[in-house]
Amino acid sequence: MSDSKLNLFSFTGKMKILHLSWIAFFITFFVWFNHAPLLGSIAESLGLSKSEIKTLLILNVALTIPARVIIGMLTDKFGPRIVYAALLALASIPCFAFALSQDFAQAAISRFLLGFIGAGFVVGIRMVSEWFPANELGTAEGIYGGWGNFGSAAGAMLLPTLALLFGGEDGWRYAVGLTGAMSLLFSVIWYRSVTDTPKGSTYFKPKKIGGLEVTSKGDFIFLLIMKLPMYAALALLTWKLSPAGVSIFTDNIANITYLILGLILIYDCYSAYQVNKEIFEKPVPENQRYKFKQVAVLNVLYFATFGSELAVVSMLPLFFAEVFELDMVYAGLLASAYAFMNLMSRPGGGWISDRFGRKKTLLILTAGLAAGYALMSMIDSSWPLALAVVMAMACSFFVQAGEGAVFAVVPLIKRRLTGQIAGMTGAYGNVGAVFYLTVLSMVSYQVFFTVIAATAVLGFLALLLLEEPKGHMVEVNEDGSVELIKVN
């Protein structure tokens, strides 16, 4: 795995896997947010109201929370080669359906189903962790996350132009359909070009599928507690669709949805018990244990980092337009600087983590994130516009570098559970976005940024409980032999 240095201009061995992985992730985000820059044309073509447009935005992220957990399980069980190929291929179906939609109902259903492609991120985290050694893992995962995440920004830049080139009132349909074709084509390229591990390496799988394995009774209780915010976020989305929000759901439909979420939570907890019931009968050998608190801390940090990124990217153009009285096109261009930072910031966070230590890096970046958002809460019309943009970009560095540093740690907790851990941590990013956007709908911009800063402070305190990965993690082969995997 470590036979050659990390050379970005190479397209062989582990570097080939890294490049194909970030391209796959790039395409998932390109498809996932293909509606955002075309909303004006879509609304005009389908005759959508403002509340229906807002509903499409909500539906687009709703399914991603459970999808990341499910895709994490499937990745650990069946391997990233098959799962990513299947996800890219299947996601093209609702993408084509959205392009062919004739009314709001068809658009809403296909947009809801497309939220599943947002889980693709999890697959590549496991793939990259299989191919890169611990001393390069943060950098590799940062490149994967940062360059892939740029797919949404690339879509914002390219899709309106594509729609204009196709021309006519159906130009947006051809542009959206083209993204689906890209996803379908790359699913074949991915499947034919990658392997789950380097030749001779073992792909460790969870003993059971259906829930995250933990290694102590206390951790099992902790696991159940950490499930609650994910279901709370889905309940919050339901509330936003109810008469109390945009009035798309009736009270009866909302209440039925709450009931279904409650039943799924009960089943999820039961399934987790079925996977982990052996720990109540006999203790797990000391050398095979991992501490679930490591996962919980990373969940909280990703809530504050990726959660705030999704929320801020959604509102920043409007923020600049209203505070500085700018044209929306110009405001959108200035706000894109926040997302553009992903290309270097996320890989940078992973690289710093590799060089100077996982916990130390996270502490510094989380403190910077809290300070950055606290300063953004002070921006008003008296600020020079250039200073406000620089402040947003500086804050963005700490946010996205923090994301890179979080996923520099995720693959070092328990190799055979990496997909599920990445899935849960990734889902918490979406939970954060739902929370922050809900806060934004109720308060001023200044209070919104202050709330993010406060949650970052909570993340910093939680981070004090994180243990720096050291030594080796233990995995057991099917024949019972023990394999040590270096983590620092």
Image (cartoon, grey):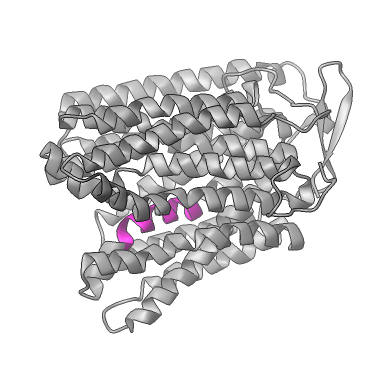
Residue 419, position as x, y percentages in the image: 61, 33
Relative to 202, say whether 432 is above or below.
below
Q: Can you see residue 65?
A: no
**Viewer-nearest residue: 442 or 335:** 335
**Viewer-nearest residue: 362 or 150:** 150
Residue 304, position as x, y percentages in the image: 48, 54
| Image quadrant containing the N terminus | top right
* Residue 308, magenta (yes or no): yes
**Viewer-nearest residue: 20 or 147:** 20
Residue 412, position as x, y percentages in the image: 72, 42
Q: Residue at x 86, y 18 (%)?
A: 480
Q: Residue at x 80, y 53 (%)?
A: 5
* Residue 176, magenta (yes or no): no
Relative to 262, say whether 296 is above or below.
below
Q: Residue at x 19, y 39 (%)?
A: 170
Q: Is residue 40 left or right of residue 408?
A: left
**Viewer-nearest residue: 459 or 479:** 479
Main secondary structure along the magenta-highlighted residues: helix
Residue range (magenta): 303-316
Relative to 83, say whether 389 is above or below.
below
Q: Quadrant of residue 103?
A: top left
Residue 131, position as x, y percentages in the image: 74, 39
Which residue sits furthest right?
481
